[in-house]
Image: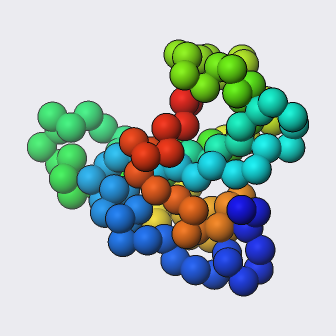
Amino acid sequence: MIASAETARMPLSKDALSTLARGEVIAAELKAHNAGHRRYVVVRPFKDTGNRDPAFATLPWRYRIDAYEIDARLVDEHVSPDVLVDLKDVVVGDFASLEKQLPQWAALELFRDNRQVLAPF
């Protein structure tokens, strides 16, 4: 499903929000532009310090958003960025910025825990 003005206003699901709050990856699979490819948008939460830092729990999450296509034959392989097509990479500093950026790339209701989507990168 491609994001439209109507679907882009729908919020992330409770499951997607819960996954992000745990510091885990969410992803959406979209229709690929190229035949024989698969297209994904992936959100990875991170903090600017290691989890052993005493202040880790109090630090805000930041988010890396990657959008890309990959040859469908490589989906189940361990891949590097050089095999990705049309890779876009953005880092946003807070959840409000994430909510503004994501609808530009995919409808929010498409995002799920990446353990369900299985985006390879």
Relative height, residue 11 to residue 41 (above, below): below
Relative to 106, is 9 above or below?
Answer: below
Q: Quadrant of residue 5?
A: bottom right
Question: How far from the left and from the top, in percent, is residue 35?
Answer: 87, 34
Q: Position of residue 88 (x, y in %)?
A: 73, 41
**Which picture quadrant has residue 39?**
top right
Horizontal and vertical percent for residue 109? Answer: 55, 69
The extreme right residue here reads: 34
Name the residue rendered at 60%, 26% in the picture.
Answer: 75
Which residue is more in the foreground, 111 or 93?
111
Query: Whole-percent x and y of residue 102?
Result: 63, 62
Q: Is residue 104 visible?
A: no
The residue shown at (35%, 65%) is 15
Q: Is residue 73 left or right of residue 109?
A: right
* Drawn side of residue 31 relative to residue 92, left or right: right
Q: Image height check: is 2 above or below 34?
A: below
> Which corner quadrant holds the N terminus?
bottom right
Left or right: 54 with respect to 78? left
Q: Residue at x 39, y 42 (%)?
A: 115
- Left or right of residue 8, residue 92 in this image: left
Taking depth in this image into account, of 29 and 102 the one nearest to the observer is 29
Q: Residue visible at 65% across and 67% down?
A: 107
Count of picture labels: 0
Q: Which image quadrant: the C terminus?
A: top right
Tell me, what colour scheme is on the image?
A: rainbow
Outermost residue on the left side: it is 54
Q: Is residue 119 visible?
A: yes
